[in-house]
Amino acid sequence: MTNTIKSVSGTGIPLMLDDIDTDRIIPARYLRCVTFDGLGDHAFEDDRQQDPRHPFNASKFSGATVLVAGRNFGCGSSREHAPQSLMRWGIKAVIAESFAEIFFGNCCSLGVAAVTAPRDELDKLAAAVEADATLEVVVCLENLTAKAGDLCIPVKMPSSAREALITGEWDYLGQLLSASCAVKEHVLTVPYLNGFSA
């Protein structure tokens, strides 16, 4: 069955900085991994070592699923490791003023909802999350809003990406598994797979 993503909810973590590139999200020395396992532990590793007050170090934001960020988030190299590290840290949605195009695409292919909002609205959301780290943030892709307590802000997402998440089309493996009966039937009709056990 495909994995539809119509909304994401959870606590938030604010990181209102601009031009955060993929090298800062996951340092290059962690790109030698064979799998993406364990990358979440090293999200913003260098920034966190240089600044003990970095939000990803703060225990109050532990377990957050919604990242509130600034302009041009995910710029730099096109590595998939950056959104993989955020996702494996626990992030399921990113609300930013804007995204680097390839980073945005990588998020969508992983099922991470990446939506944009005006800076003044982001500042309000970040302040609300900073003031109360237990506040639930709900990113609704169906009506394109982000809510936190009494605050409700409009968000945007390209219609094609939004549709892919809402319908589950982003999840190619899920689509394949949901059609397993049809795949098994088709295998029987392929001459060079004669005798193959599906």
Image (tube, rainbow, N blue to C red):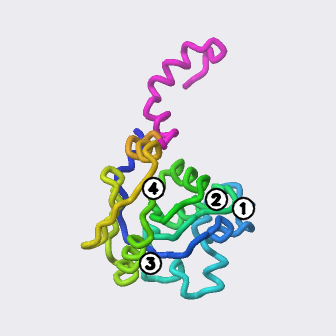
Q: Residue at x 47, y 57 (%)?
A: 114
**Mark-to-mark CA distance, 1 and 2:** 7 Å
The nearer-to-camera label among 4 and 2 is 4
Q: Which residue is mark 3?
A: 61
The residue nearer to you, when weighing 159 against 168, is: 159
The nearer-to-camera label among 3 and 4 is 4
Crowding at mark 1 (Cα within 10 Å: few <14, some 14-19, many 20+): some
Crowding at mark 4 (Cα within 10 Å: few <14, some 14-19, many 20+): many
**Mark-to-mark CA distance, 3 and 1:** 26 Å
**Mark-to-mark CA distance, 3 and 2:** 22 Å
- Circles 1, 2 touching at the beta carbon (< 8 Å): yes
**Mark-to-mark CA distance, 4 and 2:** 16 Å
Q: Residue at x 37, y 73 (%)?
A: 125
Residue 12: give x, y in percent of width and height.
41, 72
Q: Which residue is mark 1?
A: 31
Q: Describe the element under mark 4 as helix, strand or loop.
A: strand
- Circles 3, 2 touching at the beta carbon (< 8 Å): no
Image-based side of 70 in relation to 135, left or right: right
Q: Residue furthest left?
A: 150
Q: Describe the element under mark 1 as helix, strand or loop.
A: loop
Q: Which residue is mark 2?
A: 81
**Mark-to-mark CA distance, 3 and 4:** 19 Å
Q: Which residue is mark 4?
A: 113
Report the magenta residues as a range: 170-198
Report the amino acid beneath label 3: Phe
